[in-house]
Image (cartoon, rainbow, N blue to C red):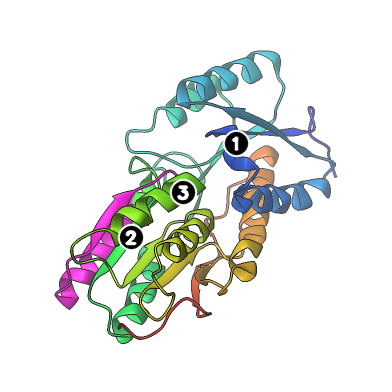
Amino acid sequence: MEVSPTGAVGLVLARPARLLGVEPFFMEFIAGIEERLAERDLSVLLHVVSDHEAEIAAYRRWAARGLVDATVVVNPVVDDPRPAVLRELGLPAVVVGDDPDLPAVRTDHAGPVAEALGHLLELGHRRIARVTGPSALQHTRARTAALLSGCAQAGVEPVIVEGDYSEEAGAKLTTALLSLPEPPTAILYDNDVMAVAGLAAAASLGVAVPAQLSLVAWDDSTLCRLASPALTTMSVDVHQFGVAVAESVLERIDGVPVTPRWSPTAHYVPRGTTAPSP
């Protein structure tokens, strides 16, 4: 099989570097990509930057120097400038998310949110909150829209607060939610790190989980299973997600039509942090 000229696929993460050390998602995701690329003697060239401007600058350097054969674009945002730049540079790319012009590996956000909400409603919860990721992200907005739609149908008005996937945000926002005059009886988090921090914040306030408060995490990492009690979660096969992205990247490099792909769908895994509403 023909080997790529550079042997590298670029991935730029525009996020605080400190989060990579505590958030398991991207390490599992990259491991899935690497596993599939290794079969073709390819590897991931990872670059961590502070914002999209620095990310675009990295793409321009890579294109000018011929350092990568393709790129993986993650975390699409509203009015995202990156796809247009990559097309201008002629740098083959696969978007992890939705894009009208570039090959993409898409994710169903609405279905899993509806599933999580359905379980909480079945448990009798009516005061429901969600701690989101950054609101500019397409997938954050899609999950928010799904939650608002489902809650409206159930006659429930959720409280939605914005986080940044960090432990600090999870603790601070959970504390603020539990300090409301009518605090939520259930909180759905957009990642595992914020959920684990939320669990600790509840304990520090003397709020019993799950007797007084139910918590649901997103991304079923080891953090969720090792927490005490173990976290109920929307479980995603992140490794297989990375493998699917790598398959699309290889097709892009080979110059053949890219097969439409979807990431593994998140599904509800009940553990020790959910119970009937008090």
Rendered position, 219 above or below 59: below
- In the figure, is residue 134 to the left or right of 177? right
Neighbourhood count class around disc 1 (C-alpha, 10 Å): few under 14, some 14–19, many 20 upward: few
Q: Nearer the viewer, mark 2 or mark 3?
A: 2
Residue 64 or residue 212, whichever sits in front? 212
Return the mark for residue 126. Answer: none
**Which stretch appears magenta?**
141-165
Q: Residue at x 37, y 81 (%)?
A: 119
Horizontal relation, residue 144 to residue 59: left or right: left
Element type where label 3 sits in the image: loop
Q: Are marks 2 and 3 in contact (CB under 8 Å)?
A: no
Specify which label sits upstream in the sequence, 2 or 3: 3
Which amino acid, mark 1?
Answer: Arg
Residue pointed to by mark 2: 130
Which residue shows up at 70% across the image and 41% down it? Answer: 254
Which quadrant of the view contains residue 41? top right
Indicate which disc, 1 or 2, sits on the residue closer to the N terminus.
1
Q: Quadrant of the N terminus?
A: top right
Place residue 73 in its image quadrant.
top right
Q: Tag 1's secondary structure?
A: helix
Indicate the position of residue 253 as horizontal and vertical percent values. 68, 38
Q: Which residue is mark 1?
A: 18
Q: Earlier in the sequence, mark 1 or mark 3?
A: 1
- At 80% from the left and 28% from the top, the residue drawn is 5
How many C-alpha atoms fall within 10 Å of the one at disc 3: few (<14), some, or many (≥20)?
A: many
Q: Horizontal placement of 261 versus 84: left or right?
A: right
Q: Is residue 166 visible?
A: no
Q: In the image, what residue type sits under mark 3?
A: Gly
Which one is in front in this view, the residue at disc 1 or the one at disc 3?
A: 1
Q: Is residue 164 magenta?
A: yes
* Residue 78 covered by magenta stretch: no
